[in-house]
Image: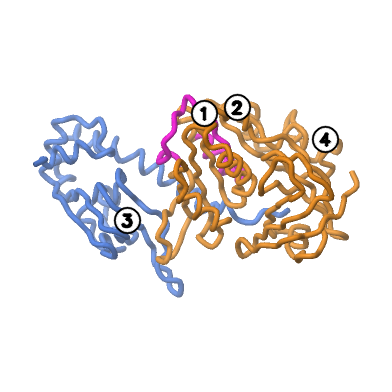
Amino acid sequence: MKSMADLIREHPFIDGLDEAIIALIAGCAKNVVFKAGDYILREGADAEYFYLIREGTVALETYAPGRGPITFLTLKHGDILGASWLVPPYRWNHDARATETTRAIAFECKCLRDKCEADHHVGYEMMKLFIPPLVDRMRIARLQSADVYGDSKV
Amino acid sequence: MVPQFWPVKRRIRETGDSITLDLRAPEPLRLRPGQFNMLYAFGIGEIPVSLSGHTGETDRVVHTIRSVGAVSAALASIKRGGTVGVRGPFGNAWPMEEAVGRDILLVAGGIGLAPLRPVLYRILENRQQYGEVGLVYGAREPDDLLFQRDIDRWRRTEGLQVRVTVDHADQEWTGEVGVVTKGIPKIQFDPVNTVAMVCGPEIMLRVVADELRSLELRSEHIYVSLERNMKCAVGMCGHCQFGPEFICKDGPVFPLDRVLDNLLRREI
């Protein structure tokens, strides 16, 4: 049976992370499963866990009065769910709903923040992992807000 | 230079603002994927519209039009039995010969799937000539997806990888949400031996080009279809000039390495 460190090491997001750091952060991790329709995060709630998605699909949503939930991104195997744990006040700014059975590794956010504070090398390595997907999400959000498929005046 | 008037044999509503017109030419034409015709709405005006159906020797000429201005709205309102003014075909073709023996990656955004549909038809008619084939298609919302019956059929076609995504959706949509670049790494292809063909809004072209080059496709094997305002379509009026190129006669299909510098120039 695989250890938590094994599962973390196999996840595409963790590619290249130092073995000692994997062993350290494994202490903050656990396996979780969500059924289709389960809300994993809720806007405004405290960011207690973030997730490495191993299997399944998660829809990131924002709720608009009169329109209902609007999905703005779907995440799958290899993606991370949740970045607000990095920034005070550590609260989620969107909803996240499993659209099918979804397996993930959940990391307790405070546990991981404490380890980053105690050892800044660990903190720096975690930032190096998180910054590229955050930059990519910003690029995606810019494109979506630019409404590139909107009307051209021809 | 004078339009001929061809009858509309079939009219298909694709989305809320896009329709496909199936026209009959007076005689078979030799059409290539990537080319366009100038379509004339009598008394209103003329616009370039890419071929969006089967190509080769045919008298059946198919165009998909998005209603966004006076001319396109007039063309989109023409019913079966009506007539459309046609000049063409003009322009060059997608690199089907270069793609033989290679993997092919098609990336389309919005109405950009229309000029690429003839490529997919040609590939599927000659499937054994090509390696891995993938289509990544993005649109604003699920209702804006073109050719939904074709997409359903392509998803079920063995040997064809299809990823469809929308920018945002409600909970009824069970597919992917996110920009079109997210789907590209999910397609299996050999970057060293792949020809990519990309069509869509120019912002999308630039972003997709970046993504493809980050995956180590070479710029000379990435092809884009450009558009600018066209009037004469024969390289005389200069309206479609793009740096040293005329989109109407040197394009609309270009290898990326030939146009990348000018794609990044704001004043062109």
Q: Which chain is depicted blue?
A: A
Q: CA distance from mark 1 to mark 3?
A: 34 Å
Question: Which dot marks residue B235?
Answer: 4
Q: From which residue to which does the magenta span run?
A: B184-210
Q: Disc 2 versus disc 3: distance between alpha carbons? A: 39 Å
> Which residue is disc 3 drawn over?
A58
Subunit that carries the residue with mark 3:
A
Q: Amino acid at mark 2?
A: Glu
Q: Residue at x 78, y 54 (%)?
A: B24
Look at 58% across and 56% down and name the residue there. Answer: B147
Q: Residue at x 13, y 49 (%)?
A: A30
Q: Quadrant of the C terminus of chain B?
A: top right
Residue A89 image position (x, y, % from top left): 26, 56
Report the colour scheme: by chain
Q: Does residue B256 appear to the left or right of A105 in the view shown?
A: right
Residue receiving disc 2: B98
Marks 1 and 3 in Cβ contact (< 8 Å): no
Q: CA distance from mark 1 to mark 2?
A: 8 Å
Q: Of the residues tagged 1 and 4, which is closer to the observer?
A: 1
In the figure, the shade used to draw chain B is orange
Which residue is at the front of the view, B104 or B249?
B104
